[in-house]
Image (cartoon, rainbow, N blue to C red):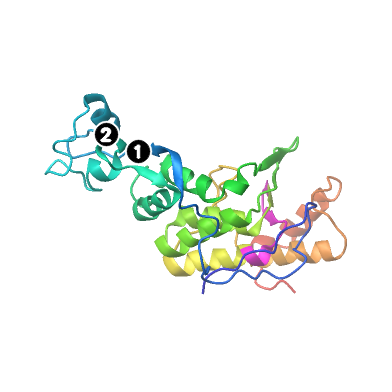
Amino acid sequence: SSPTKSATPSSSLSSKPSSSPSRSSKPSSFPSISSSPTQVCLDTPNWKDVGGNGCDDYTRYGSCSYADSIIAGDMGSASTHCCICGGGSTTCEDLRSKCQKYINVLDLGFNESGLVAPLCKEAESCSCEEAADHDVKIVTNERGEQETVGLYNECKCYFWSRLCEDTRRGEACDYAAEYCCGDYWYFGLGFGFEYLNSPKCYCDFFNYAQKEFGHTLKPKALNISKEFDAPCGQMQDFIAELKSRGLDLRLEYERPSLEAIYYGTDGQNWTNSA
């Protein structure tokens, strides 16, 4: 089944949201998509015809005579993708449609590092205009441990979860998990990640991506070469148990003793969290 999202996290960090995650498996409609024309026509980024010519080349030479002929690229012709030839994107729906259709084409949905490429970034931006001031902060302490602040966003959650479900593209699920499930803390070593707003939401996304197409979620906000730890494993149960006793792993004076307990009991190979 499709993953569930977190309820809107509060402004203060907590171990779980105030209510259970409740996103429906299939949104009834795509949120906040404008069908009105954008202020400008946007060429499809990185589109090329069979001769390696992009929309900038068609614009430079001002000729579309052969746009729909044999020189059209694998993704279609200049009349579909280039404004100068009557194509391109003039509405948010155009952008979203192209993002969904070409998300698996190298560099159009995501770049080689898995970060959002211009086509899908533009689709996200115009689809979630109310999130224009959505500012995600990364807090890093003196030990290099990192924490996200303000990651949850409802509109971006639905934008990326829809792409995750419809395109089965791993990077789309990475972004969906972060915007739907909220903040996390990365502190390396055996502990890895602590999911601050909704471990259950991250667990659902993690299992969905693994089961449906063998993808392991990766943190996009931090842009580090690291996969998420299983949010529903023994380590998260251990963290939840400690927090239920009033302990905070982020407190420096508690950390060494907690690490000693974990490693001293062969924590990486636990099979029972009781």
**In the picture, which quadrant includes the C terminus?**
bottom right
**Can you name the residue that lies furthest to the top here?**
60
Instruction: Report the residue marked by disc 1.
Output: 43
Can the viewer see residue 11 in this picture? yes
Asked if the magenta segment contains residue 194, the reply would be: yes
Q: Please name the amino acid that badge 1 sits on.
A: Asp
Give the CA separation, mark 1 to mark 2. Answer: 9 Å
Mark carried by residue 6: none
Q: In which quarter of the view is residue 191 placed?
A: bottom right
Identify which residue is drawn at 29% across, 38% down. Answer: 82
Instruction: Report the residue marked by disc 2.
Output: 54
Q: Residue 261: x, y in percent?
A: 78, 58
**In this rendering, position of residue 77 left or right of residue 21:** left
**Secondary structure beneath label 1:** loop
Identify which residue is drawn at 87% across, 64% down. Answer: 245
Could you tell me if the residues under marks 1 and 2 are in contact, i.e. CB atoms within 8 Å?
Answer: yes
Q: Residue 78: x, y in percent?
A: 24, 40
Residue nearest the viewer, comparing 143 with 87 = 87
Can the viewer see residue 228 in this picture? no
Label 1, residues with CA under 10 Å away: few <14, some 14-19, many ≥20: many
Label 2, residues with CA under 10 Å away: few <14, some 14-19, many ≥20: many
Identify which residue is drawn at 68% across, 41% down. Answer: 137
Q: In which quarter of the view is residue 32 placed?
A: bottom right
Query: Which residues, given as a range, are shown in magenta?
Result: 187-201
Q: Please name the amino acid that badge 2 sits on.
A: Gly
